[in-house]
Every structure is written in structure tokens, then in C-alpha cells.
Amino acid sequence: MRMANMIKVGMADLNICHSPDAITTLGLGSCVGVALYDKTTHIAGLVHVMLPDSTKVRQNQNKAKFADTGIDLLIEMLEKEGVRKQSLTAKIAGGAQMFAFSSNNDMLRVGERNVEAVKQKLKDLGIRILAEDTGLNYGRTVEFYPETGDFVIKSVGKPVKTI
Amino acid sequence: MQEKSIEFDVLTEIGNIGAGNATTALSQLINARIDMLVPKVDLLTFNELAEIVGGAETLVAGILLSLEGDVDGMMLFVLESSAAHLLVDQLMGISSSYSKEGKGFNDIEESALKEIGNIIAGAYLSSISSLTNMLITSSVPYLSVDMAGAILSVPAIEFGKMGDKALLIESQFKDLDVDISGYFILIPTIESYERMLRSLGL
């Protein structure tokens, strides 16, 4: 068997992977990592969402950046690999508020809004969220393993979490 | 292209003057000589942004202030965690130990760090204020010690509303004995950014 690779997804970026490879994105802060998974084919995709809504931003060419267009594009890529949308499930992580602002400055509530937007989009598509690790005030590195469906979450000074 | 380079020159100059003032303030605060390297203005992709501080998972201290007045936005001051420990120890008169590298900060160290951030940012902002003749006020400082990618996601998201790149005014300074790299990231809202350039005649 060939060596398993770890596929990296950057900020405002997305990709897919086949078992035994795994897929990761590093240092999620207020962004949300959305892992979509088909357990029958062991194919998964991961998108690193930065902003909730592509229709609110003029510069919206990069589809991976937004919850709405990013999830759509990821599903398109997975379908090209023969995955059926109906068999997809999701695990999500991130959406932290990195700085403990008390003000109602809209710039700072973006983590929360990202999580809400991702959940709404998945609900609209009928994709069930099996597990989530969202909110709070710390960064997360996530790794998704399509072989097992494990979503591994690493944070500074905290034990590694598998959801 | 020509216009862009003038814009860049102006922003570099803002960075230069701001960082110069900030470095002086920092020198006085910790009572040691600190040299500043010439700041750079860069237009970076989001992923390059995290690379400047050594990768998305590097442990850093970020001190964030929100800006109000004629310039809305945020200002972020980022230090590698080891550099932050050095500064805090120097401020508190404790001899530095490298064993603290990669460790967190206690409550007293956290407030010292916020104070460092406050003074540095204040010096930086007041020079931008006088240069542009614009009133800029800042909030109290907020601190987060975490992975660089997570902390830099805050400015990256803000820039994400405008495009796929972030404008970074990067200033590095160094102690006589040890390198202390610090990065200022000024994050004006798109409207404020345009106002700033206009006030400078651009």
C-alpha cells in the first residue's frame, strides 16, 4: 500500500482526499473548517471558510472563502469523484472569538456568524452535522481521516480531541 | 503600477514613522536600547500572512486594539511568544529564562503584555494621526496567545471582505542582545483606508 499523505488546505481554500490520505487545515481562528464525508467511498472534503455570505461582499470570486459558495463548490468536487450528495455527513470546527472584546463591534463577532452560516447552509442542503467543536476563544488545527471519519482537533495547551 | 508604487511608498513611510515612535516608546519602557529594521509594506495572500511569523501553528502573542474616530478598523501587534516573554521579563525586571519558551502567560504577565501593546500601539497611532491629520482613538488592548494562523485570521477576515490579499505594514525591531521580531498590522476598513490616502493627497 502506498504511503498516506496529509493534504493541506489553506485559508479560504478547499480540497478533497481519498482514504488512506488525510486532509488538514492549520490554525483555524474565527474561520470555520467544514469537513464533508462519504463513509461508503471513504472520500472526504475540507473547506476553510472565512466569511459567512458571498452575497454581502463585492470581491467574491474566490468561492472557497464563503460558507455558502464554499460548501457548494466542495460538494461539486466530491460529486465529480462519484460521491452522492445524499450520503454526505459533516463535521465542523472553528469559529472562535480570538479576542475577548466586550464591544458590539461587528468585526469581532465574525466567528459566531461563520458558524451560523455554515449550519444554515448544511441544513438547507439536508446534510447532517455529526459533530462540532466550535466557538470559545482559542485556535484549532484540524485533521480529517476519511478512513475512519475521525475529525482530530489540536489546540494550544489542550489535549487532542477526536470528534 | 506607478500609482501603486506611490501608495506603497506612503504606506511604508507611515509604517516607518509609526514603528520608529513605537520603538522609542518600547525602549523607554523596558529601559534597553532597541533597534528597528526598516519596515516593509507587503500585499500578501492569506497564507503568506501566517508564514511571516513562522507558520500557522507558531505560538504568538497578539495584542489587538479597535480603532475609532476618523479611521475605523483594528490594529494588531504580533510577537512571537518567546519574544513576548523576553519583553515581559525585562519590563518586570526578572532575568529572562529561555525555559519559558512555548509556555503561556500568567495574569500579571498578561497585563504587562497588554500594557506593552497599549504603549506601542499608542505611539504608532499618534504618529499616523499627526501625519494624516486625522483623529484616531483606540480601545483598551485585548490579548490572545495562540497559534499565528488563528490570531491572524482576525485581520485576514477583515481584508477578505475587500479581496484575497492582506496589506501588512511589517516592522521588525531587535534588542541589542536578542532579536525581537514584532509585526504591526494596521487594518483600516476599506472606507478609512481610502480616507487615509486622500488625506495624504493620494
Image (tube, coloured by chain):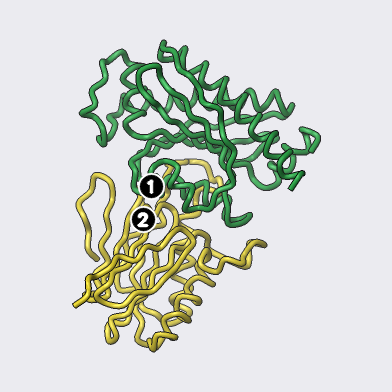
Question: Dividing the picture into quarters, in which one does residue A127 lie?
Answer: bottom left
Which amino acid type corresponds to the residue marked 2 in the rendered image?
Leu
Secondary structure under badge 2? strand
Question: Dividing the picture into quarters, in which one does residue B105 lie?
Answer: top left
Residue A163 appears left or right of B25:
left
The answer for which chain carries disc 2 is: A
Residue B195 disc label: none
- Give the vertical position of B35 relative to B114 (above or below): above
Which one is in front, A95 or B80?
B80
Chain coloured green in the rendered structure: B
Q: Are marks 2 and 1 on the same chain?
A: no
The answer for which chain carries disc 1 is: B
Residue shown at 40%/27% (left/top)?
A: B180
Which one is in front, A93 or B107?
A93
Chain coloured yellow in the rendered structure: A
Question: Residue lying furthest front in this view?
Answer: A2
Which amino acid type corresponds to the residue marked 1 in the rendered image?
Gly
Residue, disc 2: A26
Give percent across and percent down for residue A44: 34, 76
Residue shown at 52%/31% (left/top)?
A: B171
Q: Are marks 2 and 1 in contact (CB under 8 Å)?
A: yes
Give percent across and percent down for residue B74: 56, 39
Mark 1 Cα shell of 10 Å, populated few (<14), some (14-19), many (≥20): some
